[in-house]
Image: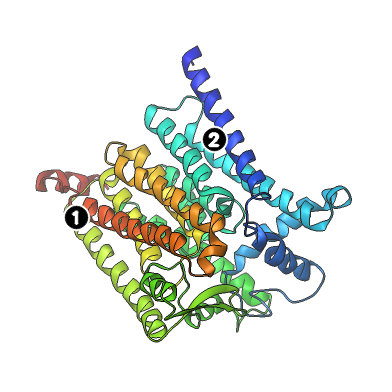
Amino acid sequence: MSRARAGRLAVLWVAFLLVHGLVAVVGWIYPSQPMGDVVLVYEPWSAAALSGGSVVGVTETWVYPQLALLPMLLAKALSAPLVAAMGVSGAYLVAWAVLVTALDAVAFGVLVGPSPAQPRRIAAWFWCGALLLLGPIAMYRIDAIVVPLAVIAGLWLTHRPTIAAALLAIGAWIKIWPGALVLAAVIAFRARVRILFAAAAVTAGVVAVLFLLGADTELFGFLTAQTGRGLQIEAVAATPFLWLAVAGAARIEYSFEILTFQIGAAGADAVGAVLTPLMVLLVIVLGVIGAVKAVRGSSFPRLFPPLALSLVAALIVVNKVGSPQFQTWLFAPVILWTVLDRTRARVPAVLVLALCALTCLVYPLSYDALLRGELVPVLILTARNALLIVLLAVGIRALVRVPAHHPKNAHHLKNRK
């Protein structure tokens, strides 16, 4: 490796460490307690499971897929040596930040390698920038555990498809959204049977273990728990109701069952009820478009990135929940798009960086004002939600414009399988 390349690589790693350290620290400084879920929810869940109490997802219905408990338990184990020095809450927060940083470091190492080409360096800078702009919510949520898994899996899809699919399936059993990447890979990649088999094998293994643990009635509780929740104030579809709240014609209410703020207004429940079927329909439509492109011989580097981003963006835009950490779901698709086709990834990357900045301005920086229905944070959130729709439109446009190979080339590719 040349000295110049070694220097660029060193700068990347220094930036990675500085960004993670800064984001971890500002979680203690910013308002609205952005790492509150870690100590108020994750730690009690893990402590109960380790002490012989209730086990979320096994003995009681849980909002997350069951494997989400594993990193919470791991953070609890890592915090044990720190308890005497920092106290229970402080130790768990530090352990969580260390765990997220370590997982990100593994994925970052896979991304940049010993001598990264320019697209990978650009993708690495994008990741650092997105994390910095989004702030502590990018680290202090369970979603942060899934991002590095998705990045590694995406980078390994073409030469380690079985391992990549297994990682995505594990990620989907922590948070559901990596399933969109599995779908995109099945559609866009020729080794789709291996991907399906690996994902199905992981799922079967998880289900079998959960049955042995006695989770039969709670096995898919994370799906049923979502159906009963209302329209969250940060959801894209909640934007008109927020303006009604500004005018005093709607309410912002706290749900103690789901632990989030929701819209209370005439028509809000009806809008929330329509969103899930609409999401399923949109995913099907995007999948059909991608499948048609694949059948016509579109190449993996051109087809997979816009299909993956469009599917993930659809899960955010047409969702009754609009949690700020959802922006982390966009990191992996943009990173992979940049690696595979950096020229066409520029606009999506800029949009995601802007989304991260706007989201941080809303949560945690002006969240208290948002809950009071004040004008400025509602304006910022409206801009953020409008930009999410723009990102989805950009992804769909890129997907529709993916070229098909000439029939002779498509026939040649088919014969090479």
Say left or right for 61 vs 330.
right
Note whether 26 is above or below 368 in the view shown.
above
Please say if 280 is above or below 217.
above
Residue tagged by mark 1? 400
Q: Residues within 10 Å of mark 1 (few under 14, many from 20)?
A: some
Q: Secondary structure at mark 2?
A: helix
The part of the image, by quadrant, that contains residue 170 is: bottom right
Residue closer to the observer: 377 or 400: 377
Q: Name the amino acid, label 2.
A: Gly
Task: Where is residue 276? Give x, y as percent.
Answer: 38, 76
Location of residue 205 in the rendering, given as x and y in whole percent from the top left corner: 57, 66
What percent of the width, then of the height, locates residue 147? 51, 51
Q: Residue at x 49, y 57 (%)?
A: 362
Question: Is residue 403 positioned above or below 284 on the image?
Answer: above
Q: Amino acid at mark 1?
A: Val
Where, by quadrant of the figure, is residue 292 drawn? bottom left
Residue 367: image location, x then y, percent:
54, 61
Can residue 174 be seen in this snapshot?
no
Q: Residue at x 21, y 54 (%)?
A: 397
Extreme residue in the top direction: 3
Relative side of 153 to 283, left or right: right
Q: Which residue is mark 2?
A: 109
Kindly check if marks 2 and 1 are in contact, taking CB atoms under 8 A apart as contact.
no
Q: Nearer the viewer, residue 409 or 114?
A: 114
Q: Residue at x 63, y 51 (%)?
A: 30
192 or 99, nearer to the observer: 99
Residue for point 72% across, 53% down: 93
